[in-house]
Image (cartoon, helix red, strand yellow):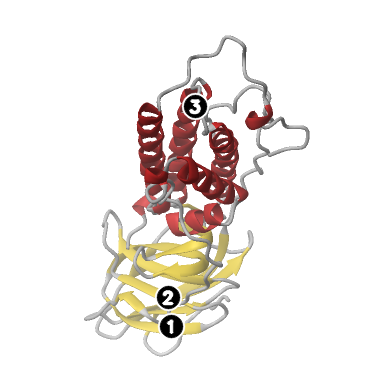
Amino acid sequence: MPAPNPPAGYPMPDAPAPRKRHVGWWIAGGITAVLVLGCCGVGAGAVLLSDLPAGDDGPPAMSAGDYHQLIARIDGDLGTAMGAVTTATSPAKVSNATEKLRATTSASLDEIRGTNPPKGQAAAHGALLDALVSMDTTAAATGSAADAYEVCTGTSAAAMIARSEATKATRAAAQLLAQADPPLAQPFAAYLPEPTPDANRRLKHGAFLARPNGGSGHLKITGGKQDALVTLARKGAKKPTLSVYIRAKAKLTITGIRDGDYRVYIANGVDWDPRAKRFNRDCGYQRDTTGMRFSTSSATYTIWRLTLQAGAAGNVPSEPADPDTFPI
């Protein structure tokens, strides 16, 4: 993920290689009246900015009022950038938001590094510089996790950032700033998320987000190793005809599917977010490339069977689906 480089003298953060996730599908079906035919189942050696010696010809000390305004403005810029990270709704949006957070952090570092703080603010100033460097590293790691689909929404991104050393360092710098400049006690770094453990929320097996009706078609689903959301949408449609939550290794038969050609979408992962209607962590998004056709006559109706499997196995051609265009 392209992003601004850390200041001179700092190591580049190690970004884990993106990890692709996929789900193999086994599918079988046919038209039948009585019987279904075919079933399938910060690095070592880094020098902290607060340790660097001040130059002999540095800028004059900034007044307390001007310094307060500078810190408040930087705090606002960082808060806006962090807000975009914590409200992102897909891995790509998390990645883009962390890139912008890094750019904001880099610009803040450049501005603060060129400032001579007022008397009594040197310790807080140095601590803030160190915290911003640490936040840049954390933002890079969060973006890499999003690229690997380990972090899938702003909720999981916020949890990762909240537990980081960067957040601890920023809060410590905020305390030092508040001690030297009491008006900064409340507003500074209020945007930082509170540390929380990872959640593992799940919907009830068979919970419908969209339920078909009025048709005769059947879809029999067998879950895989992760919880999943199985969706049928007519080709070109933005809203699904069917969207149902399938718990891992559980089975469900859905009826009432109307005749037509449908595309199958599968989202799988950990920690279902009911507001975003997405998985927060370790997610994957796939769609089939052939589709399902349901048709009914006076004597027959269609039954399809869909088995979700982790890995490359499966007899359904599929491709990665864009979470931002996933029909929900």
In which quadrant will I find the N terminus? top right
Check contact, mark 2 vs mark 1: CB within 8 A: yes
Residue 316 locus on image (x, y percent): 52, 61
| Distance CA(mark 2)–CA(mark 1) | 7 Å
Q: Which residue is mark 1?
A: 204
Upstream in sequence: badge 3 or badge 2: 3
| Distance CA(mark 3)–CA(mark 1) | 56 Å
Upstream in sequence: badge 2 or badge 1: 1
Residue 201's place in the image compared with 19, above or below, is: below
**Tag in front: 3 or 1:** 3
- Residue 220 versus residue 273: which sits nearer the camera? 273
Q: Is residue 288 among what the camera can see? A: no
User: In the image, what residue occupies the spot 53% across and 55% down?
Assistant: 162
**Amino acid type of the residue tagged 2 in the rendering:** Tyr
| Distance CA(mark 3)–CA(mark 2) | 56 Å
Local packing at callout 1 (Cα closer than 10 Å; few below 14, some 14-19, many 20+) is few
SS assignment at label 3: loop
Check contact, mark 3 vs mark 2: CB within 8 A: no
SS assignment at label 1: loop
**Tag in front: 3 or 2:** 3
Identify the disc placed on residue 117: 3
Relative to residue 252, is residue 168 drawn left or right?
Answer: right
